[in-house]
Amino acid sequence: MAHATVQGAPMTRPCPRPSAPLIVFLVLLASCYLALTRLPAAAPLAALIAPSAGHASGHGAVDSCAGFYRGAGAAGRRAVTASVEEFGAVGDGVTSNTAAFRRAVAALEERGGGGGARLEVPAGRWLTGSFNLTSRFTLFLHHGAVILGSHDPEEWPLIAPLPSYGRGRERLGPRHISLIHGQDLNDVVITGSNGTIDGQGRIWWELWWNRTLNHTRGHLIELVNSTNVLISNVTLRNSPFWTVHPVYCRNVVIKDLTILAPLNAPNTDGIDPDSSSEVCVEDCYIESGDDLVAVKSGWDQYGISVGKPSSNIIIQRVSGTTPTCSGVGFGSEMSGGISNVLVRDLHIWNSASAVRLKTDVGRGGYITNITIANVTMEKVKVPIRFSRGSDDHSDDKYDRTALPIISDIHIVDIVGVDVQRAPMLEAVHGAVYEGICFRNVSLTAIRRQIRWQCESVFGEAHEVFPAPCEELRNNGSSSSWCGLP
């Protein structure tokens, strides 16, 4: 296969041991190859998960990746604390509190100094436009507190597009800022006693439906180029666009969230880690009009040029429904590369797919070293899907020779009941997906198509029902890279 313009390449699988001189030659060759392609190394993600005894379900210790966050805010250690009421905010659901929130953050940043600050939002309905957070800062929503996004688009100012997208995701030019925003920060916490942040997104959805949207909609929460981010114990509702969007971030923990949007609300993804690393998503319930969780890393030539991958990501104990999209998606914006991702304990129902890899000609990049384990699903249309793009590009300057590389995808311990069809695995035209492993998969009560659909996808399948496509049949053999040792 001819090499494409990419930023990564598939991992190789074990092979018989060659002679010593040949080993030396292969090592030198591999070193040169890895230097050229920047092949991401596999990370032992399981070692990054620690037992946690204090889980809200009360069922005892569970494994947690919350240790990715290393800031001081998790223990509530901030030098100063104040209520937003002290800065003139009124929680009547009518009064605009945009200025009050902005004053509060600015004042607490000055008061807290190196010790940080905590802004409390008491019970009430607090209408506001966009406001920015600061470093060493905690936004705490008490029980009964509801932050409401303003209906006035002017209170969602325009900002520059992300470099890895080159333009607004929906429209050319700038994009609307998120309701709660932060950039170049360290140690930021958004948490509470199950308070709510409601973007009141319907006015934005209607602009989309009516084709009168001038600029890309804002997210509910976006943190850019920030480290040590913790978002937990709140309910997020009715985002105009993607709900939680950490981009160019490190050490991010998103846990114990309820995320809700109408099932027909356009592009209301739940959680979208984007060109970010050391990300933990756990114990979240999501209902949305798009992917519940989508791992991204930039769009076409802009994502390739910026070259910021998403890596070392754990997604566990996520449940929910999305009638048009997937429980966990990869892409389709993946041009900076995606590697070392563990998805486990996923429960999806009444959805288009449980897991979906999405990419396109022109994306470049790679998706590699992915493990998807212990997934249960009911009433899902296509349980596992690798899909080609729909000619969705940033502009007409994308590189038509930039093909994605997809490799080392392990999908194990999958149970699906009342699904519409067997998996659909289709590579982008001109690309070959290799190292695809299915093990211990049971899909029953298939209503329409029992035959797998595979195109340019190769690997192995063990203990799989219904029988896989020819490209994945192992002919009774068992290799250590896919089958049980």
Image: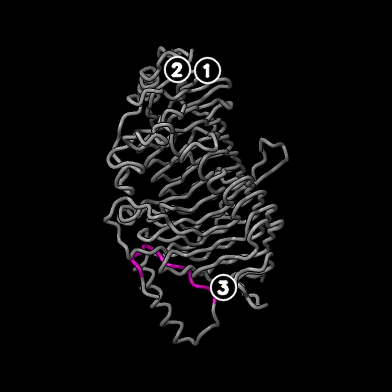
- Mark identifier at residue 122: 1
The first of marks 2 and 1 along the sequence is: 2
User: Where in the figure is residue 83, as x and y percent of width and height?
Assistant: 47, 17
Horizontal side, residue 301 vs residue 266: left or right: left
Mark 2 or mark 3, earlier in chain: 2
In the figure, 81 relative to 163: above or below?
above
Mark 2 secondary-structure assignment: helix
- Tell me, yes or no, whether the two marked residues, 2 and 1, touch with CB atoms within 8 Å: yes
Residue at x-position 55% and y-position 27%: 192
Dot placed on the residue nearer the N-terminal end, 3 or 1: 1
The residue that label 2 is drawn on is: 84
Q: Quadrant of the C terminus?
A: bottom right
Which label is found at residue 471? 3
Amino acid type, mark 1 = Pro
Vertical arrangement, residue 408 with respect to residue 391, above or below: below
Residue 473 in the image, given as x and y percentages of width and height: 62, 74
Bounds of the magenta segment: 4-14
Question: Is residue 288 covered in magenta?
Answer: no
- What residue do we see at 61% from left, 48% from top? 50
Query: Looking at the image, which is closer to me, 260 or 480?
Result: 260
Give the residue drawn at x 67%, y 40%.
53
In the rendered structure, which amino acid carries the disc numbered 3? Glu
Between residue 174 and residue 257, name the one nearer to us. Answer: 174
